[in-house]
Amino acid sequence: MSLMPHVFDVVSYRDGNWWTFEIPGLTSTASEGRRIVAMGQARKASDVAREAKGVAALWLDLPDADDVDVNVEFRQNSQIA
C-alpha cells in the first residue's frame, strides 16, 4: 500500500437486488461531451466499500485496491447530485 492512499466519496443506493454505487470524484468526458462517472454494484451493503475500492483502482490503473480508501454514503434513491 502506498503511504498516501487516494480517498473518494462513494454514493450508494438500493437498485432492485443490488446496491449500485457511483464515485463522483472519478469522471471523464465522452467524445460527444457527456460526463461518465465511475460506477459499480454489490450484492450486499457490506460489500460496497470493497467493490468501490476495486473500481477506483481499475479506473486509476493502480496495482492494488488497498491504495484506495472510500467514504460510503447510503441513500434511499438514485438521485445523486
Image (tube, rainbow, N blue to C red):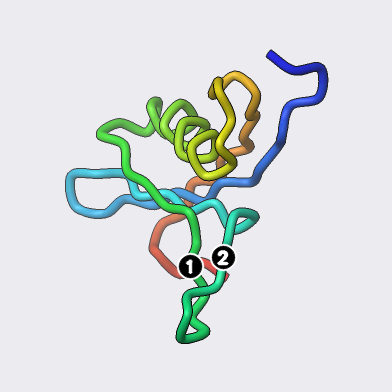
Label placed on residue 54: none
Residue located 24% across and 44% down the image: 18
Comparing 75 with 38, the one in front is 38
Vertical placement of residue 80 versus 60, above or below? below
Give the left or right position of residue 79, taking residue 14 as reference.
Answer: right
Residue 14 image position (x, y, % from top left): 32, 50
Q: Which residue is mark 2?
A: 28
User: Element at badge 2?
Assistant: strand
Residue located 52% across and 44% down the image: 59
Vertical placement of residue 55 versus 79, above or below? above
Q: Which residue is mark 1?
A: 36
Image quarter of the N terminus: top right
Question: Mark 1 is on which residue type?
Answer: Ile
Residue located 51% across and 66% down the image: 80
The image quarter containing residue 77 is bottom left
Tell me the crowding category of disc 1: few under 14, some 14 to 19, or many 20 or more residues within 10 angstroms, Cα based: few
User: Which callout, 1 or 2, points at the residue further toward the start of the chain?
Assistant: 2
